[in-house]
Image (tube, helix red, strand yellow):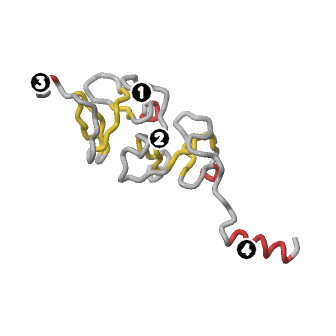
Amino acid sequence: MTRSVIGTWLAFLALGGCESGLVEVDGPCTTSFDCVDGAVCFALPGAPEGQGRCMAKCTTDERLCVGGEVCLGAASDPSTRVCYLGGPNALGAECADTTDCELGSVCVDLGDGTVPTCVLACDLRAPGCPMGYSCEVLTEPAGFCALVPEEEVTP
Protein backbone atom coordinates (compact mmCIF):
# COMPACT_ATOMS: atom_id res chain seq x y z
CA MET A 1 0.00 0.00 0.00
CA THR A 2 1.13 3.50 -0.62
CA ARG A 3 1.67 5.91 2.22
CA SER A 4 -1.45 7.97 1.29
CA VAL A 5 -3.68 4.88 1.21
CA ILE A 6 -2.40 3.78 4.63
CA GLY A 7 -2.94 7.29 6.00
CA THR A 8 -6.48 7.38 4.61
CA TRP A 9 -7.25 3.93 6.08
CA LEU A 10 -5.94 4.94 9.52
CA ALA A 11 -7.98 8.17 9.43
CA PHE A 12 -11.06 6.14 8.47
CA LEU A 13 -10.55 3.83 11.47
CA ALA A 14 -9.87 6.73 13.84
CA LEU A 15 -13.13 8.40 12.81
CA GLY A 16 -15.13 5.31 13.65
CA GLY A 17 -15.14 3.80 10.20
CA CYS A 18 -15.75 0.35 11.64
CA GLU A 19 -19.52 0.19 11.90
CA SER A 20 -21.56 -2.31 13.83
CA GLY A 21 -23.09 -5.25 12.05
CA LEU A 22 -26.24 -5.17 10.00
CA VAL A 23 -28.14 -8.07 11.57
CA GLU A 24 -31.23 -6.78 13.38
CA VAL A 25 -32.52 -8.09 16.72
CA ASP A 26 -33.78 -11.69 16.34
CA GLY A 27 -31.56 -12.33 13.32
CA PRO A 28 -28.96 -15.12 13.16
CA CYS A 29 -25.36 -14.33 14.11
CA THR A 30 -22.02 -15.93 14.84
CA THR A 31 -20.45 -13.04 16.80
CA SER A 32 -21.67 -9.77 18.32
CA PHE A 33 -19.91 -7.91 15.49
CA ASP A 34 -22.70 -9.24 13.24
CA CYS A 35 -25.39 -7.43 15.27
CA VAL A 36 -26.62 -3.83 15.12
CA ASP A 37 -25.55 -1.39 17.85
CA GLY A 38 -27.16 -2.16 21.20
CA ALA A 39 -27.43 -5.87 20.46
CA VAL A 40 -25.17 -8.85 21.11
CA CYS A 41 -24.97 -12.33 19.67
CA PHE A 42 -26.52 -14.61 22.29
CA ALA A 43 -25.79 -18.32 21.97
CA LEU A 44 -28.62 -20.48 23.22
CA PRO A 45 -27.95 -23.60 25.28
CA GLY A 46 -27.68 -26.62 23.02
CA ALA A 47 -27.23 -24.55 19.85
CA PRO A 48 -24.41 -25.64 17.56
CA GLU A 49 -21.12 -23.80 18.09
CA GLY A 50 -21.15 -20.38 16.44
CA GLN A 51 -24.92 -20.14 16.04
CA GLY A 52 -26.74 -17.45 17.96
CA ARG A 53 -29.40 -14.75 17.73
CA CYS A 54 -28.91 -11.00 17.93
CA MET A 55 -30.66 -9.76 21.07
CA ALA A 56 -30.89 -6.31 22.64
CA LYS A 57 -28.69 -5.66 25.66
CA CYS A 58 -30.22 -5.06 29.12
CA THR A 59 -28.86 -4.47 32.61
CA THR A 60 -29.03 -6.25 35.97
CA ASP A 61 -31.50 -3.55 37.08
CA GLU A 62 -34.02 -4.78 34.52
CA ARG A 63 -36.14 -7.87 34.83
CA LEU A 64 -38.50 -7.21 31.98
CA CYS A 65 -37.52 -5.32 28.86
CA VAL A 66 -39.68 -2.78 27.02
CA GLY A 67 -41.22 -5.43 24.74
CA GLY A 68 -42.03 -7.81 27.62
CA GLU A 69 -38.90 -9.89 27.13
CA VAL A 70 -37.13 -11.34 30.15
CA CYS A 71 -33.65 -9.90 30.83
CA LEU A 72 -31.32 -12.91 31.07
CA GLY A 73 -27.61 -13.40 31.66
CA ALA A 74 -25.61 -15.65 29.39
CA ALA A 75 -24.57 -18.93 31.02
CA SER A 76 -21.03 -18.44 29.71
CA ASP A 77 -20.86 -14.80 30.93
CA PRO A 78 -23.61 -13.70 33.39
CA SER A 79 -22.45 -10.08 33.08
CA THR A 80 -23.71 -10.13 29.48
CA ARG A 81 -27.47 -9.66 29.71
CA VAL A 82 -29.99 -9.66 26.88
CA CYS A 83 -33.71 -9.15 26.33
CA TYR A 84 -34.44 -12.80 25.63
CA LEU A 85 -36.79 -13.31 22.68
CA GLY A 86 -38.31 -16.52 23.96
CA GLY A 87 -38.22 -20.22 23.27
CA PRO A 88 -40.67 -22.83 21.96
CA ASN A 89 -42.41 -23.84 25.22
CA ALA A 90 -45.74 -22.18 26.12
CA LEU A 91 -46.83 -21.08 29.58
CA GLY A 92 -47.48 -24.16 31.73
CA ALA A 93 -45.21 -26.40 29.67
CA GLU A 94 -42.31 -28.34 31.17
CA CYS A 95 -38.88 -26.77 30.82
CA ALA A 96 -35.26 -27.39 31.68
CA ASP A 97 -34.14 -23.77 31.45
CA THR A 98 -35.68 -20.32 30.95
CA THR A 99 -34.39 -20.31 27.39
CA ASP A 100 -36.98 -23.06 26.73
CA CYS A 101 -39.88 -20.73 27.61
CA GLU A 102 -41.87 -18.37 25.39
CA LEU A 103 -41.46 -14.59 25.38
CA GLY A 104 -42.02 -13.07 28.83
CA SER A 105 -41.87 -16.28 30.80
CA VAL A 106 -39.31 -18.05 32.96
CA CYS A 107 -38.66 -21.66 33.92
CA VAL A 108 -39.45 -22.18 37.62
CA ASP A 109 -39.01 -25.21 39.85
CA LEU A 110 -41.37 -24.64 42.76
CA GLY A 111 -39.59 -27.32 44.81
CA ASP A 112 -42.86 -29.09 45.54
CA GLY A 113 -42.07 -32.26 43.62
CA THR A 114 -43.61 -31.04 40.38
CA VAL A 115 -41.53 -30.63 37.23
CA PRO A 116 -40.18 -27.16 36.40
CA THR A 117 -42.64 -25.23 34.22
CA CYS A 118 -42.78 -22.03 32.19
CA VAL A 119 -44.54 -19.28 34.14
CA LEU A 120 -45.08 -15.58 33.48
CA ALA A 121 -42.17 -13.42 34.61
CA CYS A 122 -42.69 -10.26 36.65
CA ASP A 123 -40.66 -7.50 38.23
CA LEU A 124 -41.12 -7.15 42.00
CA ARG A 125 -40.92 -3.35 41.65
CA ALA A 126 -43.89 -3.25 39.24
CA PRO A 127 -45.50 -6.71 39.25
CA GLY A 128 -48.15 -6.58 36.54
CA CYS A 129 -49.44 -10.11 37.15
CA PRO A 130 -52.95 -11.08 36.03
CA MET A 131 -55.82 -11.10 38.55
CA GLY A 132 -55.58 -14.07 40.90
CA TYR A 133 -51.76 -14.14 40.68
CA SER A 134 -49.09 -12.45 42.76
CA CYS A 135 -45.49 -11.64 41.91
CA GLU A 136 -43.32 -13.98 43.98
CA VAL A 137 -39.58 -13.49 44.41
CA LEU A 138 -37.23 -15.53 42.27
CA THR A 139 -34.08 -13.44 42.73
CA GLU A 140 -34.30 -9.68 43.41
CA PRO A 141 -35.82 -7.92 41.45
CA ALA A 142 -36.85 -10.96 39.41
CA GLY A 143 -40.13 -12.60 40.08
CA PHE A 144 -42.72 -14.92 38.62
CA CYS A 145 -46.50 -14.78 38.67
CA ALA A 146 -47.74 -17.42 41.10
CA LEU A 147 -51.36 -18.44 41.50
CA VAL A 148 -52.78 -17.09 44.74
CA PRO A 149 -54.33 -19.95 46.77
CA GLU A 150 -58.15 -19.70 46.80
CA GLU A 151 -58.31 -19.17 50.57
CA GLU A 152 -56.21 -16.00 50.14
CA VAL A 153 -58.32 -14.51 47.34
CA THR A 154 -60.64 -11.78 48.59
CA PRO A 155 -63.90 -11.19 46.72
Check disc 2 and report the residue beneath it: 84
On the picture, is 37 further left or further right than 79?
right
Looking at the rendered structure, the secondary structure element under dot 4 is helix
On the picture, is 20 further left or further right than 92?
right
Image location of residue 134, percent across then percent down: 23, 34
Residue at 39% across / 34% down in the picture? 105
Give the spatial CA distance, label 4 vs label 2: 37 Å
Image location of residue 64, percent across then percent down: 38, 44
Q: Tell me how many marks there are.
A: 4
Whether label 1 touches label 2, CB < 8 Å: no
Whether label 4 touches label 3, CB < 8 Å: no
Check disc 1 and report the residue beneath it: 95
Image location of residue 63, percent across then percent down: 36, 46
Give the spatial CA distance, label 4 vs label 3: 71 Å
Check disc 3 and report the residue beneath it: 151
On the picture, is 113 further left or further right than 68?
left
Give the spatial CA distance, label 4 vs label 1: 51 Å
Looking at the rendered structure, the secondary structure element under dot 1 is loop
In the foreground, 22 or 61: 22
In the foreground, 137 or 76: 137
Q: Nearer the viewer, mark 1 or mark 2?
A: 2
First in sequence: mark 4 vs mark 2? 4
Q: Amino acid at mark 4?
A: Ala
Q: Residues within 10 Å of mark 1 (few under 14, many from 20)?
A: many
Residue found farthest to the front = 155
Judge whether 91 appears above or below 143 on screen. above
Q: Amino acid at mark 2?
A: Tyr
Check disc 4 and report the residue beneath it: 11
On the picture, is 120 further left or further right than 48?
left
